[in-house]
Amino acid sequence: MSKTILTAILAALVAGLIVYFVANKNEEHTDIKVTVESIKNISELAVVEYTLSESLKRTLKESNPLIRDAIFYIYMKGVIKGSVNLELGNYDIDIDKRTANITFPKKAILVSNPSFDEEDIEFTTCKDRIFKKINDANRNSAIKAAIKAMKATAKENGIEAKVKKEAKLVIENYLTSLGYQAKVIFK
């Protein structure tokens, strides 16, 4: 009888150890997946937004000196977002050592075109031609020029550097809160 009890206790102990090791092995795998996925999920916290406006004068030159040039202005406002493409990151996460080193290439920094609504664009015509009016193609060209100018202004104002700083801060703080020594590098 005592042999049966001893066998049952031993079997229960072995089963408990197997469950313990299998559970710990699965936890490690889940921990890596959750860490990388959770880093990607917090990426919205590292988005930098600039609200900008641009005013441009557009002159449509006329080749005939007897016909005056057409002049109009475009005023446009919009929001430009800077972010990090986390899919391009190289993630080196060591669960045992509780370290995380993440490296992003230069092309991981994204600067969007401005988002805007129709009411965010205004055209003012100062001089128009009698026979050749300012048309949609002229307006579309002006919008493209304003978008290009707004992106250039955002870059001049340091949107890329601010995105790097914010992403580094958010990701490192997040990983530190999980108990990791974290290092985020942008090349």
Image (cartoon, rainbow, N blue to C red):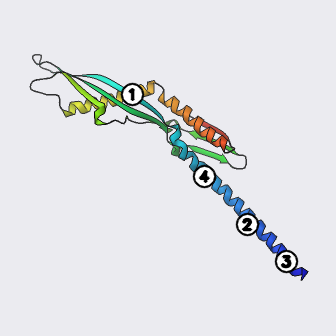
Where does label 1 land, which residue? 52
Instruction: Name the quarter where the N terminus is drawn.
Output: bottom right
Question: What is the CA distance from the residue labelled 1 to the residue labelled 2?
Answer: 58 Å
Q: Earlier in the sequence, mark 4 or mark 1?
A: 4
Residue at x-position 63% and y-position 52%: 32
Residue at x-position 36% and y-position 36%: 115
Is 119 located above or below residue 94 in the figure?
Answer: above
Instruction: Name the quarter where the C terminus is drawn.
Output: top right
Residue at x-position 55% and y-position 34%: 166
Crowding at dot 2, Cα within 10 Å, few <14 / some 14-19 / many 20+, comes out as few
Q: Is residue 149 left or right of residue 96?
A: left
Where does label 3 land, which residue? 7
Where does label 4 land, which residue? 34
Give amino acid for label 4: Val
Q: Nearer the viewer, residue 132 or 179?
A: 179
Is 138 located above or below residue 27 in the figure?
Answer: above
